[in-house]
Amino acid sequence: MKLTVLLRKSHEYSNPMNSYNNKYQYTFIVNPISGGKDKKAFPDLLTKYLEAAPDTYQILYTEREHHAYELAKTSIHHSDYIVAVGGDGTVHEVVNGIFPTDKPMGIIPLGSGNGLARDLKIPMNEKEAIRVLNAGHITRIDVGRTPDRVFTNSFSLGKVADIAHSFAKLPMRGMSGYILCVLKELFNNKRIEVTLHIDGEKRHEKVALLDVMNISEYGNHLKVAPNASATDGTLHLQLFSKFPWYRLPGWAIQAFFGRPIKSKLFSSISFEHLKIEHGETTGQCDGEPIHLSPGIIEITCHPRALPIFTKADHPG
């Protein structure tokens, strides 16, 4: 099965303000449009709060889709730490740019949902997130791996994937646009047929939504997988056989309070290796839309494979 590769091959990126002959302690990769939030003040925040001299770090701005991946891929050769400044989409590209080099990364969460940052208890306040970098505490987290990419949050087929593709087409960013896409897909009763091989056990399912979760939430505290952990060495497969619109308010309340969803329409299974036989052409990874070819997707958990800056009291 072939997935359409959205993360293009890295190339040398020319920026007149920086020289790749230099060695930097930090490279900050900033997505200027993530979450609809202004990033103009970010350089001043670094000057004020980062405990590093200005000539020991550089700031690079993305200019197009998948540019964060390209910048991260190049920056690993001349930086000790790569920091994603944006949302989960920016984090996804940076992770794919540095994996599997074992290069530690940081997150300054300035996106819409910030699912990974929230799950790892990284502060939403930029000043406090910079102080996490200063403290230097590193936690190693699990990642999921598909044939052409890795993910830290989730991989999905079905309804969540359709929402991700709708959101990507909107001119607006932020939570308001995401809510519009959710409402649009809410009354879509499409179900997909999949054959699953879960750690060698085979089963056939017809589902409205298939999620593979590495962390507990989608973002914005919506904990759809409260038992999932980024440091437990497993991924969590979640299946909704149907997704009736009138059940959404109750399920949403359970998710916001971090309570496991209890329904005959829902099931959750932890695993280390999963093979999915499917006929889909769309999916999502870490909130980013991806294009698929019908066939087989293999997903494997790589335990503790990604070093990332977190607060010192993080249990990982």
Image (cartoon, rainbow, N blue to C red):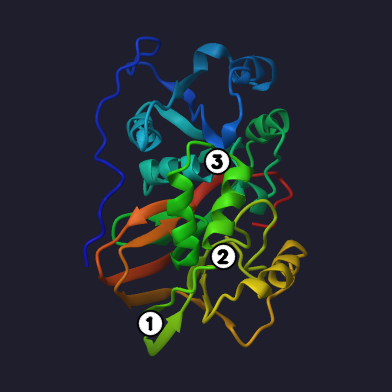
Residue at image coords 26%, 26%: 12
Q: Judge from the rendering whether residue 56 lies leftward or rightward of residue 248; answer left or right.
A: left
Q: Label 2's element?
A: helix
Q: Earlier in the sequence, mark 1 or mark 3?
A: 3
Residue at image coords 30%, 63%: 281
- Where 101 falls versus 78 (above or below)? below
Q: Label 3's element?
A: loop
From where the camera sits, is residue 221 visible? Answer: yes
- Give, as a three-letter code, the residue at label 2: Leu
Q: Judge from the rendering whether residue 299 lies leftward or rightward of residue 182; answer left or right.
A: left
From where the camera sits, is residue 304 visible? Answer: no
The crowding category of the residue bearing disc 1, from other C-alpha atoms within 10 Å (few below 14, some 14 to 19, many at least 20), is: many
Q: Position of residue 315 (x, y in %)?
A: 69, 57
Residue at image coords 37%, 41%: 97
- Give, as a three-letter code, the residue at label 3: Gly
Report which residue position mark 1 lands on.
196
Q: Earlier in the sequence, mark 2 or mark 3?
A: 3
Q: CA distance from mark 1 to mark 3?
A: 31 Å
